[in-house]
Image: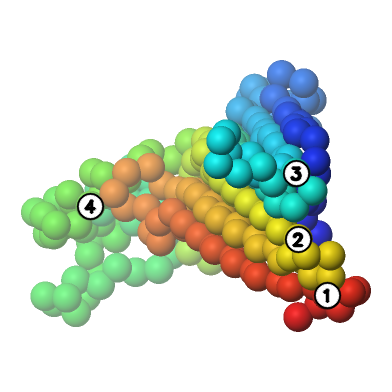
């Protein structure tokens, strides 16, 4: 990686790359479902400044010591569409009458009458878990073997990933034959998880946070580097 160095004159730059869903076309499948464009925003920005190291009344680094500093940030709103399979209202109530797979009563070893589990036989803990599940919001597709619909819930939303990075470089001339420079870089990135289901039953592992620090020192003498 090549990093710029400062010069005898102060110079700086500002930059930004911008994207917004208002400038994008909707995709074919969202148009087919009558859905609006999701939030999709990308804002990459930063700035640089460099020049001689100058401390009033203490040090003038012109022709000897230079600095360069860069900051870059990234802020995004990134859309997602997660598809899941969840039980419908009948299955949650213990009604498996449309299924060809018999539901066995563990107390008798025989199938439940009509393939329906009586409400007083449904475990209270299971009932509380079912209450936390959203209702299906999509027809999904038919799983004929199990007599059910699969991929019947779509969780659409957006996450807000972000990055920050700073780089600082200092160069110093040691006489006419040697030059010393050092570089420090600090980077951090937040990658929010995309939930398959809203609420506490989502099985994602959580947000990812990546950090990195780089430090380099170098001496160059008459075209050589050490």
Asked if the residue under mark 3 is in contact with the one under mark 2, i.e. CB atoms within 8 Å, the reply is no
Looking at the image, residue 191 sits to the left or right of residue 118; the answer is right
| CA–CA distance in space, label 4 to label 3 | 70 Å
Q: Residue furthest top?
A: 22
Which residue is pictured at 90% across the width and 74% down the height? 223
**Where does residue 170 sit, x and y in percent of width and height?**
67, 55
For mark 2, give the secondary structure: strand
Which residue is disc 4 drawn over? 129
Q: Earlier in the sequence, mark 1 or mark 4?
A: 4
Question: Foreground: 91 or 155?
Answer: 155
Which residue is disc 3 drawn over? 62
Which residue is disc 2 drawn over? 173
For mark 4, give the secondary structure: helix
| Vertical side of 191 occupied by 106: above or below | below
Which residue is disc 1 drawn over? 221
| CA–CA distance in space, label 2 to label 3 | 10 Å
Q: Earlier in the sequence, mark 4 or mark 2?
A: 4
| CA–CA distance in space, label 1 to label 2 | 10 Å
Residue 211 shows in this picture: yes
Camera-side mark, 4 or 3: 3
Camera-side mark, 3 or 1: 3
Looking at the image, residue 18 sits to the left or right of residue 166; the answer is right
**Where does residue 167 sit, x and y in percent of width and height?**
63, 51
Asked if the residue under mark 3 is in contact with the one under mark 4, i.e. CB atoms within 8 Å, the reply is no
Task: Determine which quarter of the picture holds residue 224.
Answer: bottom right
Question: Foreground: 104 or 72?
Answer: 72
| CA–CA distance in space, label 4 to label 2 | 69 Å
Asked if the residue under mark 2 is in contact with the one under mark 1, i.e. CB atoms within 8 Å, the reply is no
């Amino acid at each position: 990686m090549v990093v710029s160095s400062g010069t005898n004159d102060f110079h700086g730059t500002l930059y930004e790359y911008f994207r917004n869903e208002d400038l994008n076309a909707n995709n074919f499948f969202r148009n087919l479902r009558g859905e609006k464009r999701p939030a999709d925003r990308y804002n990459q920005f930063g700035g640089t400044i460099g020049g001689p190291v100058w401390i009033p009344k203490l040090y003038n680094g012109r022709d000897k010591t230079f600095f360069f500093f860069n900051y870059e940030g990234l802020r995004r709103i990134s859309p997602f569409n997660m598809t899941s399979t969840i039980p419908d209202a009948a299955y949650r109530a213990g009604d498996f009458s449309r299924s060809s797979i018999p539901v066995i009563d563990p107390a008798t070893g025989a199938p439940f009458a009509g393939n329906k589990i009586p409400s007083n036989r449904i475990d209270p803990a299971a009932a509380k878990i079912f209450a936390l599940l959203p209702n299906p919001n999509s027809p999904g597709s038919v799983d004929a073997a199990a007599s059910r619909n699969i991929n019947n819930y779509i969780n659409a939303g957006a996450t807000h990933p972000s990055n920050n990075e700073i780089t600082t470089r200092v160069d110093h001339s040691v006489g006419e034959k040697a030059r010393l420079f050092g570089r420090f870089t600090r980077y951090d990135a937040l990658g929010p998880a995309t939930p398959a289901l809203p609420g506490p039953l989502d099985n994602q592992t959580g947000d990812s946070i990546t950090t990195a620090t780089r430090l380099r020192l170098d001496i160059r003498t008459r075209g050589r580097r050490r």
